Amino acid sequence: MKYIDLHCDALTQEGVLQVTKQRLQAGGCLLQCFAAFVEGGGFARFLRLADAFDAMCLREGYHRAENGLAEDGVNAMLTVEGDALEGDIGRLETLYARGVRIMGFVWNTPASLGYPNFPDYAGLCVGRVPFCVRETRRGLTPFGREVLVRMQEMGMLADVSHASDALFWEVAARRRPFVATHAGAAAVHDVARNLTNSQIAALADCGGVIGLDFCADFLSEDTTAFGQREAMLAHAKAIVAAGGEDVLALGSDFDGIPANAYVPDPSYMPRFLETLSAAIGARAAQKAARDNVLRLFHETICK
């Protein structure tokens, strides 16, 4: 079963990578999204990472996915995580020209576009604030609202991964398709990075998708292979229960997370998809693997 992965951080990972061409081929990857993680570097860092993405596609023979996918080989799409605009909406045109079709507003700290789901990331890092404390009050900035409208006009999907609850609901209020490229279900594991049932239902109602994150910390306290297997299935089932079969997708976060004990790299995806098929049914698993994202792309960025 071929699959689509909405998020990885291989562009900015140093050393041994989880995501390689060989592993993507072994896993049956149709499309891998590569995030330009720009935290701390802004637009200049985006340009460097876009150049690195271009070089990688040429070197590895990836098909650049901007307005459609090739059925043969592995497709690659450039996305953005963090504030690449730094207050300049004109830079959206550059992002689009470089192939970006999915853009997030924030990472873990406030930015010119809006606020993250963790209200105090520094406190979280030192153990002063628990993972479950959510930012519910601060959302998009006025500039962020302007950017959201322009993105939708251009055919770029808004990514609410890492976004505050308030930011999420402002995006949902637009009643346009949007995505959470890497997230889980708060009903299964109550951390601020996961979506509540009401958020999952709202995202589904807008025609969007949620890429199931493979980050062990956001899935379960049991980090063993068996514990992660059970947690991933529980999150998948919870997302389908809250939003229906058309909302579930995959967003591993490979190379942005420690290796998940059950699915440590893309070559293990067939095992997970087989397990997912047994848990939620073959048709629903195929939708999650690729069909839901293909439908969304055809309705938005590939029109």
Image (cartoon, rainbow, N blue to C red):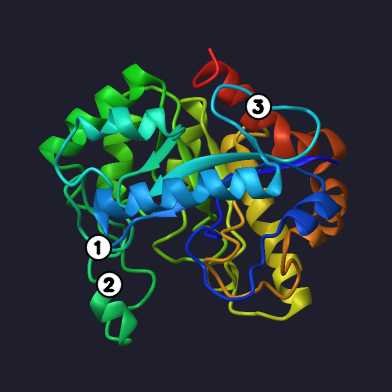
**Front one among 173 and 44:** 44
Compared across the picture, whether 81 is left or right of 225 comes to left
Q: Which residue is mark 3?
A: 294
Say which element carries label 2. helix
Which amino acid is tagged 2?
A: Tyr
At horizontal 34% and vertical 56% (from top left) the residue drawn is: 38
Q: Which mark is residue 109?
A: 1
Relative vertical location of residue 120 with respect to residue 223 in this rendering, above or below: above
Which amino acid is tagged 3?
A: Leu
Q: Position of residue 272 (x, y in %)?
A: 80, 57
- Residue 161 seen from this side: no
Say which element carries label 1. loop
**Front one among 88 and 190:** 88
At horizontal 28% and vertical 56% (from top left) the residue drawn is: 116
Which amino acid is tagged 1?
A: Thr
N-terminal of the pair, mark 2 or mark 1, is 1
Compared across the picture, whether 122 is left or right of 215 comes to left
How many numbered marks, from 0 up?
3
- Residue 163 seen from this side: yes
Compared across the picture, whether 160 is left or right of 44 comes to right
Compared across the picture, whether 298 is left or right of 201 comes to right
* In front: label 3 or label 2: 3
Q: Position of residue 151 (x, y in %)?
A: 32, 26
Label 3: few (<14), some or many (≥20) within 10 Å?
some
Q: Which residue is mark 2?
A: 121
Q: Are marks 2 and 1 in contact (CB under 8 Å)?
A: yes
